[in-house]
Amino acid sequence: MAPMSSRERVLAAIRRQPVDHLPCVGFFNPLLPAQRQGYTWNFPWRPDATVAQQVAYQAEVLGIDPLVTIGVTATAPQGECPARVWHDGDVLHKSYATPAGELHAAVRSNELWPHGEDIPFFSDFNVGHFVEPWLQSGADLACWRCLQQPRALDEIVATARAQTADLFDLASELGLATMALAGMGLTGAMHLFGASELCLLTIEQPELVDAYLQAEHELNLLQIAALGELGVDIVRRNGFYETADFYSPATLQQFLKARLDAEARAVRQAGMVSAYTVHTGVMPVLDHLAGLELDSLMGIDPAVDGVDFDQVWERLAPTKALWTGPSSTYHIWQGPAATRQATRQMLDRYGPTGLILSQCVSSHSIMPWESTLAMVDEWRRSW
């Protein structure tokens, strides 16, 4: 085949079309400063490196197929919604005064809390620190919706175009694909309701969970429309916690399938392709995943106990591209030898059609950099 640009290669692979060689997309998590305490920074770029510097290193030095991430904000508060933060002993509180009432959360603030004097809406760290979650009732959801009011589409696009022009220029200069996040579903709901609380609510108050997911779904469709106007290539849904680690296949079908399919269709109609992050807990929900209209699945970990990746590939690969490779937890942490072996096994056994080599789900700044280099070296040897 004639040589392809990185963008052409990645998009063709997602569409399960022929490629000049199998793409390798790297994902790199710097971690928050609190997570890095006591560890060495091992990335070859500085912690304060710009996006352009990081992406250029990946494309020009490593020679892989990095993505340029585009951020778009589709919401704004309804009028003035002042926030207040205070401490009560070791408990950190935050509240918003909204037209629908007060929205409040509280977390245990200790050396493991990474967000300082803030309680964000969407953070994995909320779950382990909640004293009181953001959402517990329909009244709380009404307050949250006041803070997440949809903006006009033309306003979203104009603002995003001005804020992201340099990123699109970077992608064009290096021939790279662009990707944006749209939707977190039950992943985001867990950040707001808490983990065990949300699982129980799907049984005891399913109408509350459904109301949240519908509100978010409507915002997702608005964001997808904006991304299409901007010319983004890939739209990613964060389904990290939308698996059988927490829910039955029937529960996922009930709450997610229709919305996921509608969002996937909107992405495709706008000329983009979709990616859905799922990591663990996939074996009981292979039929559910196979039946979704999404173009690709990102981050299934082949090394987790109980995963039969031959079965995963057989069930999912006929209709979906898979972004997968060495496991962050089981291979990259262990060093270059384990990473090289896992990469070689993946390349020898699967693909080339429909496979995008990437870490599951990322290299972290405190992991051995030699592991990432081993993955890249084995990938390069394959073509």
Image (tube, helix red, strand yellow):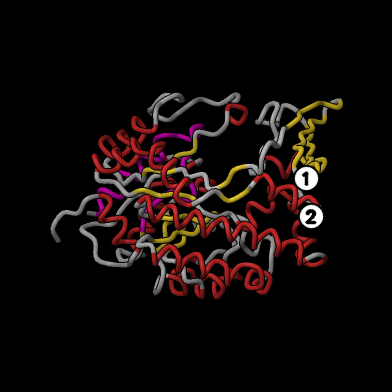
Q: Residue 270 location, x and y as percent? A: 38, 62
Q: Is residue 4 visible?
A: yes
Q: Which residue is mark 2?
A: 197
Mark 1 residue element: loop
Dot 2 amino acid type: Glu
Q: Residue 184 location, x and y as percent? A: 58, 54
Q: Earlier in the sequence, mark 1 or mark 2?
A: 1
Return the residue nearer the eye: 230 or 86: 230
Q: Residues within 10 Å of mark 1 (few under 14, many from 20)?
A: many
Q: Contact, CB < 8 Å: mark 1 with mark 2?
A: yes
Q: Which residues are magenta?
A: 356-382
Q: Which mark is residue 56?
A: none
Q: Quadrant of residue 124?
A: top right
Viewport quadrant of the C terminus: bottom left
Relative to 270, say whether 358 is above or below: above
Mark 2 residue element: helix
Relative to 28, say whether 360 is above or below: below
Q: Is residue 301 visible?
A: no
Q: Residue 281 location, x and y as percent? A: 61, 62
Q: Which residue is mark 1?
A: 133
Return the residue nearer the eye: 65 or 312: 65
Residue at 25% x, 55% y: name it: 8
Residue at 30% x, 42% y: name it: 171
Q: Quadrant of residue 15?
A: bottom left
Mark 1 or 2: in front is 1
Question: Residues under labels 1 and 2: Cα distance?
Answer: 9 Å
Instruction: Please identify the residue farthest to the right as the structure is shown.
Output: 89
In the image, taking residue 313 as reference, residue 303 lies left or right, namely right
Residue at 36% x, 65% y: name it: 350
Return the residue nearer the eye: 226 or 127: 226
Dot 1 amino acid type: Pro
Instruction: Please identify the residue farthest to the left as the structure is shown.
Output: 2
